[in-house]
Image (spheres, coloured by chain):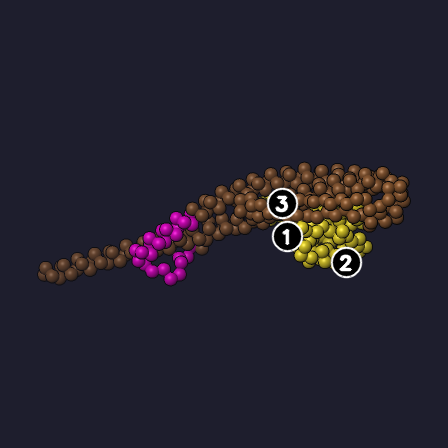
Amino acid sequence: MSQILPGTKTTRMELLRLKNRKRLAERGHNLLKEKRDSLIMEFFNAIAEIKEAREQVEEALSIAFSALTQAKMIMGPSRVVEFAQASKTKADLSINTRSMMGVRVPVLSLDHQEPKLPYSLPDSSVKLDTMSTKFCEALKAIIRLAEVESTVKRLALEIERTKRRVSALENVVIPRLDNTVRFVKLALEEREREDFFRIKMIRDRITE
Amino acid sequence: MSSDKIAVIGDRDTVTGFQMAGVTDISTPSNPEETRNSLIQYFRDPRMGLIIITEPLAVEVEDTILELSEAPIPVILLIPDRQGATGAYESVLKELIRRAVGIEIHV
């Protein structure tokens, strides 16, 4: 770990440049640490949201399934399947992204298009319509859940990446720069002492 | 990217219900191999935005789902079927959380 950067020249210019780089690295380190902390905070908020959305989905689905059972009881399973296949409702998903601290998270929205009923009213039971609306509601809840879940996923990936960067700076880049700065400083001081000594020797020789 | 499709993989009841709600891409696989195939087929569709799969089917192909979940789009979502929730979705999430924060968290 305690290496110095290869190819460093022991000059004053290099020392100044190294010091600047070290300052930059430290600033970046602090910023990344703050970013990581706030990402983790967001992450926990999103997890709480997932739990809530998940409960909503489960509730909506259980209502929808009981409506389905009722429709099947009244109309018979194969008729329900038949009507479902004839359904002209269209559900389109639109995906936008918004940025949350530099992480692009998706925003999902559903647009339902319900043209006029494709099946005949006398042939179908009212339960079929109930079931249709219940499933639409369930789908909406599911889409909210999908949004939150993929937000959490992306946040998790970003946190992982940020953590890695923070620790790389902390454990590799900054110590290495530190060592290089020390090395250059020592070399410069050594050279100064040599120069000083040389001048003294020359003075002694001249004054002899 | 403006309008993306939704796909449902599940048992007949689930699929019927979502057909009523307007989902057009559906599949009712009868064994894990078919589940995997339809999952991958939907995943490869560039217009696909969301894949909904029921928990009992998802358990059989959990490794594939974990692998495909790496990609941001399409979102793969596990939902309970008519038998109710089994908690299978947690294992997918937990793995992500464990990697991100370094500890296990109960959602």
Query: Is residue A100 or residue A34 the one in the foreground?
Result: A100
Query: Is residue A106 or residue B67 the one in the foreground?
Result: A106
Q: Does the magenta-highlighted stretch encompass residue A25?
A: yes
Which residues make up the magenta segment? Answer: A2-26
Q: Secondary structure at mark 3?
A: strand
Query: Is residue B85 or residue A101 the one in the foreground?
Result: A101
Image hue for chain A: brown
Chain assignment, label 2: B
Chain assignment, label 3: A
Label 3 crowd (10 A; few <14 / some 14-19 / many >=20): some
Q: At which x and y percent is residue A135?
A: 77, 42
Which residue is identified by label 2? B33
Point 76% across, 55% down: residue? B35
User: Are callouts 2 and 3 both on one chain?
Assistant: no
> Closer to the N terminus: mark 1 or mark 2?
1
Q: Secondary structure at mark 1?
A: loop
User: In this rendering, does residue A7 appear at all?
Assistant: yes
Point 57% across, 48% down: residue? A104
Which residue is identified by label 3? A107
Which residue is identified by label 1? B1
Find out whether the residues at labels 3 and 1 contact each other: C-beta distance under 8 Å: no
